[in-house]
């Protein structure tokens, strides 16, 4: 008799079953399970950790890190060019102020960049540790047993050959050089399982561990390294020397988070000469600074080592690197006061274009013949433009070529309080415009001058443009992890190439006696411990000669292109020689 289950139609009750009795007076209804606050918090944290340590999250964070680095390459940075960054903010108004507030002009020191960096670091560690452990387990495991139906494999074939099962198996295993292989017996013959391409996963792990090491090396460099830049006028006596004994000797010093500047390795440099050559179109062809330097024990002597310092060819001194970054011009002026006293001075002007049209200011803070508060009323500033190859178009002086073929200056004179005693830092390339706005600094005469020409002020003071000198910009860099960063970058590329070129693949051979052959050993026989044992045991393998059928199946762990012509070569291993 056949009965039909109707519980799904009646809510779990059959038509004849009595309804459950209502709970008694003392029976309380069962409350649903509620997770405690501690268990709930732990479950939440566990889920967050799983999401953070997934490979997908690591890739997203890596993309975000690259995206976050773009402002550091496209926008001026405070640490690299203070004046240009300040000018950029002024030119872009509210947008510039907003970007500065969110750290877009100090990207690599911003909190949001550090957050992405640390999350990526944590994600990589969480991904790599279990992945490495799984890979070690795969290496220790033997190749998987041969599937029952090899014809269903993406790559398959069948060969009939002569000889015994043992001879064919010996020929196949001998041809599988470089493969991890295991020989097993079946009721009908012998199977061979082989796999190759584990180096692909090694390359993958090498890539990710190298990326992790590169992040660590960069972090160590930011913690223990430093950078300092200075502008030095070439061939200017004492003004052409620089010593790195203290951060105060630099125009701009950017220490790492753990660097206080008290234990710098000192060296001294003297700039004897600077020479630049240009093509006819104005493109620079070479920049060379002739220097003499001292370091180590030579600092206590007069010994100086000469060297030609060029762009991208730094001087390496006790782990530090001295780079030639750029150059420009320093126009020089002579101030002749009404009483006949003379002051001279010059300051580097900042290039504004490829033809080295430059802007700057030369400040004279101590006018002779004045004391006390009167000094602040008679300070002078020569502000203007220097053009190495001067040309005036529409009343504006510009330069037509970067070499000093016909130098000239267009200057504006200011007199009054320059605001240098307020304690507020000022750029060497400009004056404080607030002093002009509040009337403490008064605008006077303007003139275009060639070398040797002069202009006079209302009180008889004469300003003479005496000529120019060239300045060079040097940068000292120290990064204790720079060598490791290079090593990790190289191994990262090696791992990437390995993971892209090596293919993971598996192949199985089932070798059984066909028509005219003998059977194999008993079903359920234990697997041989070695190839020699499998081929020499007469109980478990066929030794009679006859026709042998070999079924072959292959599987590429990546895609169909993982085998190519190699599978055809594997089939030929089973064929009679």
Image: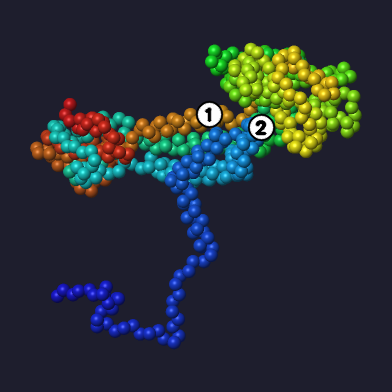
The image's mark for residue 486 is 1
* Residue situated in front as seen by the camera: 539 or 100: 100
Residue 524's place in the image compared with 4, above or below, is above
> Residue placed farthest to the front in the image?
394
On screen, residue 164 versus residue 265, left or right, reads left
Under tag 2, what secondary structure?
helix
- Residue at point 12% right, 39% down? 514
> Splitting the image into 4 quarters, where does residue 407 fall?
top right
- Placement of 347 over or under 142, stated as above or below: above
Which of discs 1 and 2 lies nearer the camera? The answer is: 2
Q: Earlier in the sequence, mark 1 or mark 2?
A: 2
Question: Residue drawn at (89%, 27%), measured in percent from left and top?
Answer: 370
Q: Is residue 282 above or below residue 522?
A: above
Outermost residue toward the bottom in this view:
25
Q: What residue does disc 2 label?
A: 83
- Dot label at residue 223: none
The residue located at (90%, 32%) in the rendering is 372
**Number of residues whose C-alpha sits closer than 10 Å to that of mark 2, classed few (under 14), some (14–19) or many (20 or more):** some
| Quarter holding residue 528 | top left
Query: Residue at the left extreme?
Result: 516
Q: Nearer the viewer, residue 374 or 560?
A: 374
Query: Could you tell me which residue is drawn at 43 percent across and 46 percent down?
Result: 56
């Amino acid at each position: 008799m056949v009965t039909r289950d109707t519980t799904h139609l009646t809510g779990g009750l059959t038509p004849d079953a009595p309804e459950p009795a209502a709970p008694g007076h003392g029976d309380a209804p069962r409350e649903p399970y509620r997770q405690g606050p501690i268990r709930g918090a732990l479950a939440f944290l566990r889920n967050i950790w799983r999401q953070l340590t997934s490979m997908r999250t690591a890739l997203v964070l890596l993309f975000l890190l690259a995206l976050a680095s773009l402002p550091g390459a496209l926008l001026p940075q405070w640490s690299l060019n203070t004046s240009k960054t300040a000018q950029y903010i002024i030119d872009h108004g509210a947008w510039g102020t907003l970007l500065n507030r969110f750290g877009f002009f100090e990207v690599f020191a911003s909190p949001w960049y550090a957050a992405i960096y640390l999350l990526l670091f944590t994600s990589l560690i969480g991904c790599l540790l279990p992945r490495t452990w799984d890979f070690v387990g795969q290496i220790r495991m033997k190749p998987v047993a041969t599937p029952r139906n090899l014809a269903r494999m993406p790559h398959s074939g069948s060969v009939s050959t002569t000889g015994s099962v043992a001879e064919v198996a010996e020929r196949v295993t001998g041809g599988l050089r470089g493969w991890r292989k295991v020989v097993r017996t079946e009721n009908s013959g012998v199977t061979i399982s082989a796999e190759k391409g584990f180096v692909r996963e090694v390359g993958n792990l090498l890539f990710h561990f190298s990326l992790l090491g590169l992040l660590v090396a960069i972090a160590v460099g930011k913690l223990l390294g430093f950078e300092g830049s200075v502008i030095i006028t070439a061939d200017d006596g004492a003004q052409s020397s620089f010593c790195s004994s203290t951060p105060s000797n630099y125009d701009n010093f950017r220490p790492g988070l753990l660097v206080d500047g008290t234990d710098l390795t000192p060296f001294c440099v003297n700039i004897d000469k600077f020479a630049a050559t240009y093509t006819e179109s104005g493109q620079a062809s070479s920049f060379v600074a002739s220097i003499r330097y001292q370091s180590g024990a030579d600092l206590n002597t007069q010994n100086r080592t000469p060297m030609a310092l060029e762009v991208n060819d730094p001087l390496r001194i006790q782990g530090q690197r001295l780079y030639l970054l750029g150059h420009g011009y320093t126009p020089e002026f002579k101030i002749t006061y009404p009483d006949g006293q003379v002051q001279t001075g010059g300051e580097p002007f900042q290039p504004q274009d490829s033809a080295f049209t430059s802007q700057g200011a030369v400040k004279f803070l101590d006018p002779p013949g004045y004391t006390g508060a009167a000094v602040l009323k008679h300070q002078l500033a020569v502000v203007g433009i220097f053009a190495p190859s001067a040309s005036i178009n529409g009343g504006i002086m510009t330069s037509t070529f970067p070499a000093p073929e016909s130098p000239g200056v267009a200057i504006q004179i200011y007199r009054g309080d320059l605001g240098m005693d307020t304690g507020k830092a000022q750029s060497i390339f400009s004056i404080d415009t607030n002093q002009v706005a509040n009337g403490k600094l008064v605008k006077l005469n303007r003139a275009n001058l060639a070398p040797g020409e002069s202009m006079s002020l209302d009180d008889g003071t004469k300003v003479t443009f005496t000529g120019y000198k060239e300045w060079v910009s040097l940068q000292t860099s120290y990064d204790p992890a720079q060598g490791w960063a290079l090593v990790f970058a190289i191994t990262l590329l090696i791992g990437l190439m390995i993971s892209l070129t090596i293919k993971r693949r598996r192949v199985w051979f089932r070798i059984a006696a066909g028509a005219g052959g003998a059977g194999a050993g008993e079903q359920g026989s234990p697997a041989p411990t070695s190839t020699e044992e499998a081929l020499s045991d007469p109980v478990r393998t066929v030794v009679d000669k006859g026709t042998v059928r070999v079924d072959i199946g292959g599987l590429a762990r990546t895609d169909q292109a993982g085998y190519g012509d190699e599978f055809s070569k594997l089939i030929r291993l089973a064929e009679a020689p």
